[in-house]
Amino acid sequence: EVQLVESGGGLVQAGGSLRLSCAASGFTFDDYSIGWFRQAPGKEREGVSCISSSDGSTYYADSVKGRFTISSDNAKNTVYLQMNSLKPEDTAVYYCAATWAIVVVTSPNEYHYWGQGTQVTVSS
């Protein structure tokens, strides 16, 4: 059974940091690219960051460039999202997802497996 389990969300003040983890099981981790998405109330799900399984190339949304860092530990089948200098507008449910594509994919429609999400709340 394919599973993606996010953790690390919580409540933090503006300017603070959080590290999200996405633990994967049930599939060959090295064959999948992983993306982080977020969805705020009343808004569409948006791509935050992605990492390719083929060469480790990454993508960041303009809104998080320079503040968020995605990384992968293949030995642990885990992808991390280090979030620094958090802003109230980063408040959302964050999801990780896996795609068979070996390149960076930013559309949520291209992802095949999803985690249940973890809430990130940034207070001003």
Image (tube, rainbow, N blue to C red):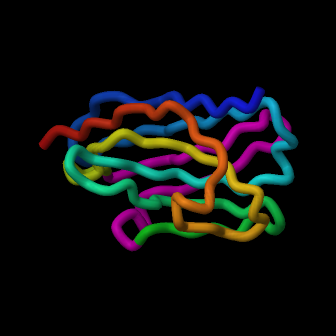
Residue 74: x and y in percent read 81, 43
Residue 19 in the image, given as x and y percentages of width and height: 49, 39
* Nearer the observer, 122 or 95: 95
- Position of residue 59 measured from the top left corner of the image (x, y, whole percent): 57, 69
Query: In this rendering, would 10 be left or right of 68?
Result: left
Q: Which residue is nearer to you in this view: 120 or 41?
A: 41
Tell whether position 74 is magenta: yes
Left/right placement of residue 65 relative to residue 25 reads left
- Left or right, 42 with respect to 28, comes to left
Quarter of the image that includes the C terminus: top left
Q: How many marks?
A: 0
Q: Measuring 22% from the left and 37% from the top, which residue is drawn there?
A: 13
Residue pictured at 52% horizontal, 51% vertical? 36
Q: Residue 15 placed where, x, y %?
A: 26, 48
Q: Is residue 86 above or below residue 53?
A: above
Question: Is residue 32 found left or right of 7 in the rendered image?
Answer: right
Residue placed farthest to the left in the image? Answer: 124
Where on the picture, by quarter, is residue 22?
Answer: top right
Q: Residue shown at 40%/49% (left/top)?
A: 38
Image position of 5 with respect to 80: above or below? above
Which of these two is toward me, 16 or 52?
52
* Image quadrant where residue 91 sits: top left
* Magenta region: 62-85
Magenta-colored stretch includes residue 73: yes
Above-or-below relation of 98 to 52: above
Camera-nearest residue between 60 and 24: 24
* Quadrant location, the N terminus: top right
Q: Residue at (43%, 68%) from the top-left corner? A: 61
